[in-house]
Image (cartoon, grey):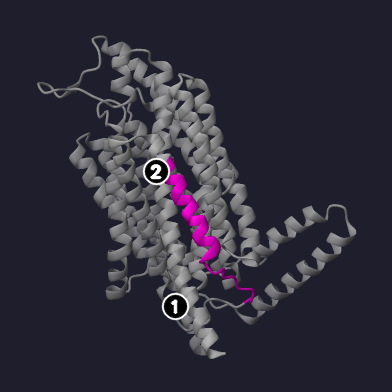
Amino acid sequence: MFSLFIQRNNHLKQSIHLIIFCFFLYKLTETILQYGTRIEIYKIICLSLINSTKLQQTICSGEITNDNNNNSIIINNDSIENQLLLYHVQRLSGYYLLIYRILLNLPATIACFIYGIYSNKYGYKISMLIPCLGAIIACTLFSISLLLMNNNLINYSIIFILIGGFIYGICGKSSAITMGANSYITNLTHINNRTSMLGRLLGINCLGLSIGTLLLGIFLTFFNYSDSIIFCTINNLLIVLILLFLVIDSNTNENIPILNDHSSLIQYNDHEKSIYCTNSMKLSDNHHHHHKNSSYGFIQLIIEQFYQSYQFLFQKNSNEKHQLLLILLFTVLFNQMTKSGEQDIILLYLRNEPTLWTSQLYSYYLTCYYGCMFIHLTFILPIIEQKFSLHDTTFIIIGLLLKIIRLLLFSITKHKEWLFFGVIIGSAAGYITSATRSIISKLIYKTEIGASFALISIFETIANLFGGLLFTLIYNYTITMMSSFIFILDAFLHGLILILFIWLRFKLILFENNLNIEQNDQ
């Protein structure tokens, strides 16, 4: 019996490593697909508006010519007309990138909602398998789009890219697989090393993003977009095989608080436990009654499953812990909203005058950003946590400060060297996500882990929609007056969140001290 227990533990440890490897492969391929597709959308819109071969090479493909005498970009003699044309390309590309983002993220919100309801019951593998299958279908549609563009059917080409994005999103995309991986690993880790484990997973995420953007630059330089699609298809097939045949599913049905030792941040009292169990039994009884005796049993099932999975958000007697949880979820929404908005805007901003970066340079810029973030989360974060035992909010404050500096550099300078310097120091923003998730995981029950990470994924997916919409509209309205205005506004908003986290830090520390006093009295 003991040997079987040891053998199962070894299989679970092996499965954790395989989950991390699959997560890395998925993020690598998704990075190539998503950033490559965004560049392709910009190129397609540009080609549909510009007939001049010279301008196509300059604006659409990024093949620029520098005048060494005055460091200005030479496009054509009629610079005013070309400037207006460039603004038109920027605006229309921004709207199509927004449409693509909506088709990608709105269905993913629904998918994550469903995964969150059923992941604790049926396991987390399903939320990692389906996005890989969706990526394979999307790659097929992207390939059809390339064939149409090569045959001068540009207007039809963009349609297949948008359909591919919709299929990719309805299967859950990275939101679902991130939810599954976070839940799987959190379910099998101890509270004392959870911040470093989640930071390590986010570090692997950044490594996948870094290598993915590097490979994208290589594909754009030496190969083409179609070769990258084939590469992504093969990798997603490999992930499906690993998840199906090598990974053991792990789901826990016991209603046991995950923070049940003296190092815990939260200890539910007996009254809270009784309320939780009573509500669960009532919901279960109601489910069977309505399911058997009413025609709308399926709808009732969905509503009850939603309430049962997310009831930690709907406490009748709101306490300090509940308020802290809601504030943290709001910061998750804000962080993802600004991060998603920045993705499209940075592409448009760097492809605009006076920078006019090439697609290759843009991909290497992203490589530098995610590579430095990987170093922060995989090496620097565990060392700091082990040596100094800093509070989670300290990491968040550091990440916010350095991100604000990075954003301000966009409005201060146009030099590549300074923009890359901003990437290096701003990559510490990865602390924000890992530390926030760690705090949230310490405020909930173990049986609520899957639902909580699903909720985070839903929030992040919704934020992708509103972030892209808000940032694109602001950028399009301010492009002719001050194209860097959006980055100044972004830095200001992050300053407000920084003040919020400074206040939240004192609240959490005071809350922990009060809990420790109560535990000592008992």
Q: CA distance from mark 2 to mark 1?
A: 46 Å
Q: Quadrant of residue 310?
A: bottom right
Residue type, numbered disc 1:
Asn
Residue 261 seen in the figure? yes
**Is residue 8 or residue 102 the one in the foreground?**
8
Q: In which quadrant is the C terminus drawn?
A: bottom right
Residue extending farthest to the left is: 69
Q: Quadrant of residue 201?
A: bottom left
Identify the residue shown where x is 46% and y is 76%.
Answer: 190
**Is residue 143 or residue 57 the one in the foreground?**
143
351, above or below 88, in the image = below
Residue type, numbered disc 2:
Ile
Q: Mark 1 highlights which residue? A: 513
Identify the residue shown where x is 65% and y is 76%.
Answer: 272
Residue 445 seen in the figure? no
Q: Position of residue 332 (x, y in %)?
A: 48, 54
349, above or below 126, in the image = above
Instruction: Pick whichever of labels 2 and 1 is earlier in the sequence.
Output: 2
Residue span colored magenta: 230-255
Which element carries disc 2, helix, strand or loop? Answer: helix
Q: Mark 2 highlights which residue? A: 32
**Is residue 366 or residue 317 the one in the foreground?**
366
Identify the residue shown where x is 28% and y is 65%.
Answer: 379
Image depth: mark 2 or mark 1 in front = 2
**Is residue 403 or residue 299 the one in the foreground?**
299
* Magenta stretch: includes residue 237: yes
Q: Rate crowding at label 1 as few (under 14), some (14 to 19) or many (20 or more) other CA atoms within 10 Å.
A: few
Q: Position of residue 270 (x, y in %)?
A: 64, 81
